[in-house]
Image (tube, rainbow, N blue to C red):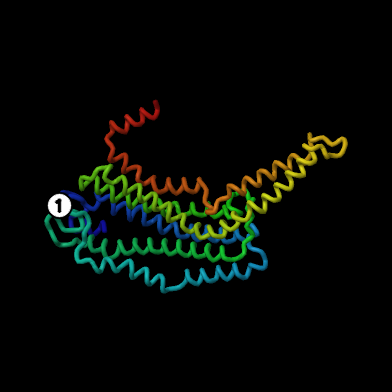
Amino acid sequence: MLILALGQGVAYGPQVTISFLRDFSVNVRFLVAFPILILAESRIDERWRNLVLEFLRSKLVNAAELPSFEAVIESINRLRDRVLPEAVMSVAALLPSLLVDKIEFLSGVSNWHSLGAGSSDVSLAGWWFNLLSTPAFRFLLFRSAWRMFLWTLFLWRVSRIKLRLVATHTDMAAGLGFLSSGQKTFTPIVFAGGAVVAGQVGNAIAYEGASLSSVQYDMIAYGVLAILLLVVPLLALAPALLNVKRKAPLEYGALVANHAQLFDEKWIQGHRPPGDAILGNPDASSLADLGSSFTVVREMRVVPIDNPTLISLAVGAALPLLPVVIFATPADELIGAVIKMLG
C-alpha cells in the first residue's frame, strides 16, 4: 500500500488531509495488530497442547474415561483440520469488500483512499486496502474466533465426561484452575484489538474533531467486551463445577461436623485418655486443616478464572489505548493529574 500510495502521490504531502503515512489506523492495524495475530496463533496452539496434557498429568481423567477424552480430542482436531471452515472464512472476509460500491473511510475528510481532495477516483492503494489487506485482516480475526469456538467446544465436551474434580483443591476451582492461566495466552490478541481501536480513535480525534469524552465509552466498551469474550470458553465448565460445589458443602460438612464432635467430646468434655495433652497433639492440627478445607469448599469458584488473569487481559486491552488518552489530553491537565496523585 505504501508503494502504491507513493506512486500516486498520496503517501504524504498536502494533496489529501490524511496521507498514508499520517494515517494512524492503517499503520497500527497492519504494522502492529496484523503481525501480532499471525505470531499469536502458534503460541496459542502450543499452549493448548500443554493444557490438554495437563488433564492427564493432574489425573483429572481416569483410565475408564480416557477413551472418551481421546475421542473429544480427535473430534476437535478433525474440525480444526477441515478445509470447509477455512473456505467459509475466506469468503466471509472477502465478501464485504466486493459488495461495497465505494470505499468509505473517514466521512468528510479527504484521505489517501482517493486521488485527492474532491476526487471520486479510488487510489490503487485504496483498492489494495479494500480487496487484499482488509480481507486478510478479517480472515485472521475470523480464524481467532474459530479457534476460540473450538476451545470452548473442547472444554464443553470434556466437562461432559466424568472428571475427577475435588472441591477442596487449593486452586479454588476443583483442580481446573490451570485453565485460567491458559486464557492469558489470548492477551496478545486483546492487545491487537486494542491497537486497532486506538488507531481508529486516534484518527477520529486528530482529523474529525472528536474529543476524548466522546469516544471514551467506545474504548471502555471494547475493554469490557474483550474480557467477557475471553471468559466465555471457561463458562463451558460452569455446570460441572456448579454440580461439585452444590454437593461438596454437604459431603465435607458432614465430615467436618463429625470430626468437630469427636474433638469436643475428647478435649472439651474431658473424655480423653489420662496423661494426654493438647499441646503437640495432632487432633488440633487436623481440626484446623479440616476447617481450612471446608473454607476452600465454600469459596470454590464455578468459573475457573482468577484475578491475575483478568488483570492481564484488562492491561492487554487498555495498554494500546493509553497513547490515545495521552495524545488527547492537554499537557497541563496531565501534569496536574500527576501532581495530584503524587500529592
Q: Could you say where residue 307 lies in the image, as x and y percent from the top left?
A: 50, 46
Give 320 or 115, whichever is nearer the viewer: 320
Is 341 situated above or below 83?
above
Quadrant in which the N terminus is drawn: bottom left
Is 121 situated above or below 304?
below
Residue carrying label 1 = 15
Q: Is any atom of residue 38 visible in this view?
A: yes
Q: Could you say where residue 49 lies in the image, as x and y percent from the top left?
A: 55, 61
- The residue sitting at the left extreme is 118
Count of marks overlaid on the render: 1
Q: Is any atom of residue 50 visible in this view?
A: no
Tell me the SS state at disc 1.
Answer: loop
Give 269 or 200, whichever is nearer the viewer: 269
Disc 1 residue type? Gln
Tell me if mark 1 has few (under 14), some (14-19) or many (20+) residues whose alpha carbon lies within 10 angstroms of its own.
Answer: some
Quadrant in which the C terminus is drawn: top left
Is 37 situated above or below 314?
below
The residue lying at 52 percent from left, 63 percent from top is 156
The residue lying at 20 percent from left, 50 percent from top is 18
Q: In this view, does 116 lie to the left or right of 305?
A: left
In which quarter of the view is residue 105 placed?
bottom left
Q: In this view, does 339 lie to the left or right of 237?
A: left
Q: Could you say where residue 117 lies in the image, as x and y percent from the top left?
A: 13, 54
Give 168 or 45, whichever is nearer the viewer: 168
The residue lying at 28 percent from left, 31 percent from top is 332
The residue lying at 28 percent from left, 37 percent from top is 329
Give 103 or 123, whichever is nearer the viewer: 103
Q: In this view, does 202 lie to the left or right of 315?
A: left
Q: Could you say where residue 325 lies in the image, as x and y percent from the top left?
A: 32, 41
